[in-house]
Amino acid sequence: MIAKFILAILLGLSTAASAQLPDFTELVEKQGHSVVNISTVQAPSMASSRGFPGMPNIPEDDPFFEFFRRHMQPQQPHGQPRDFESKSLGSGFIISSDGYVLTNTHLVDGAEEINVKLTDKREFRAKLIGSDRRTDIALLKIDATGLPKVIQGDPEKLKVGEWVVAIGSPFGFENSVTAGIVSAKGRSLAQENFVPFIQTDVAINPGNSGGPLFNLKGEVVGINSQIYSRTGGFMGLSFAIPIDVAMDIANQLIASGKVSRGRIGVLIQEVTKELAESFGLAKPAGALVASVQKDGPADKAGIEPRDVILKFDGKMVASSGDLPRIVGATKPGSKVPVQVWRNGATKELTVTVDEIPPDEKAAGRGGKRGKAPDTSNRIGLMLSELTAEQKQQLEIENGLLVEDMLPGVASRAGIRPGDVILSINNQDVKTVDQFNQSLNKIAKGRNIALLVRRGDTATFITMRMNGDSKDSK
């Protein structure tokens, strides 16, 4: 009797535990057909830069590089020389029944040919409508109709701890399903300024990039884009781009072929506990203005150094990382209210938002490699020389302001827009030309050290030269 009683309890516990676990089968059956496999054919220069054919378009200092180098088999068309072209495998998903497909920019960047394979084994040559390197979003179009498409969800309604599902092609294994939970929301990464990432513990590996992240309702809430890894494999830290951010990019690309972002011309830093106390703030919040571009939007609006921006266009600025995303999402030309903290009290101002010069690679070129912005250098930095006023405010004699940047070596090393570069390998920098000339003398594979000023502190940031910035993502 006792044995039967214990068995009944164990069976009851097992049934209760099973009842609490989600069933993903219906979700996969309904939404799996909207997920596609992405492969690209690179130009010979791209193939040779990776060291062997079959290598995806991944920089050598990326955590995925060593993993691919060891485990991915070369894939070449019959009869082609081994160093002629390179194919990369990734994922994407259909957002409209007439053939629009979302994926990651780093999968298709510089591709001579982009191919999309559906779950029913049909394959299509895709046209690159446009891409945005700052958010890693690319929009493709295939010549087909009546396609299964995803249902868009609302990332704002996601809750930390909620179950989510990824479908993609890790290591080429098509339509692989992995599941996990939302670990955090609105996560800021050092190399990204315009994306409030969704962090999950869903198993994401090479080939999952560009694939959808679903909630349990079968709605896509994000695009799997990055992992944090010390080995190249999955370690429980995956990051997805919220679908509303991605769809905004897609809609802009469809409408105009480019992505427009706002700017106000300020250099900002984080508000620490000590700074908050010194400014009389109740808690560390907002973005501290370290300097203001002369005659820029913020300057014309009356924003001053040492102001703390608390709200922008009615949106709270909880930390300095929030401001670039909020401003970037604001339509250029808009007049918006800004609340700042100055001399122990709030002050309301109005700023007219300017436009960040668009990345030339945002416009589609039928899959052909485009020219990077002329202002970007070998490591992807877009620099400008400081004005006399900025030098006086920062109390420095020389330095270059990081206006913007492309994803690559410098961004992964932790450099951000708004930083001021003071020296390269212990040589003071005075002009953009001088900096670029010094940079071009450094051989591939060698390390460089940049002395970077951020706010009131300066620190050395090291990175390994990986070739031109065009090959760094």
Image (spheres, grey):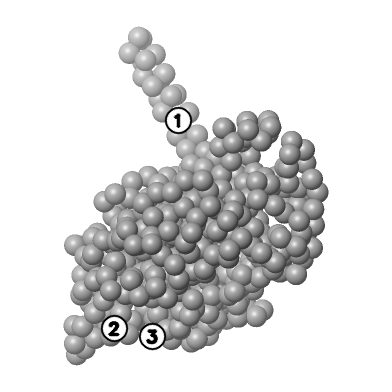
Give left or right: position of 271 versus 50: right
Q: Quadrant of the N terminus?
A: top left
State the CA–CA distance, disc 1 to disc 3: 51 Å
**SS class, disc 1:** helix
Which residue is identified by label 2?
Answer: 45
Element on which disc 2 rests:
helix
Depth-wise, is mark 1 or mark 3 nearer the camera?
A: 3
Q: Position of residue 424 (x, y in %)?
A: 35, 62
Q: Nearer the viewer, residue 223 or 287?
A: 287
Q: x and y percent of residue 339 in the render?
A: 76, 48
In space, the residues marked 1 and 2 are separated at their CA atoms by: 55 Å
Sequence order check, earlier mark of 1 and 3: 1
Instruction: Give the residue displayed 58% in from the left and 59% down from the top.
Output: 390
Badge 1 amino acid: Ala
The percent position of residue 40, horizontal first and vertical second, equals: 37, 78
For the point 38% across and 62% down, the residue is 428
**SS assignment at label 3:** strand
**What residue sits 29% from the left and 66% below the top?**
465
The quarter of the picture where residue 245 lies is bottom right
Give the labeled residue for mark 3.
Answer: 112
Q: Earlier in the sequence, mark 2 or mark 3?
A: 2
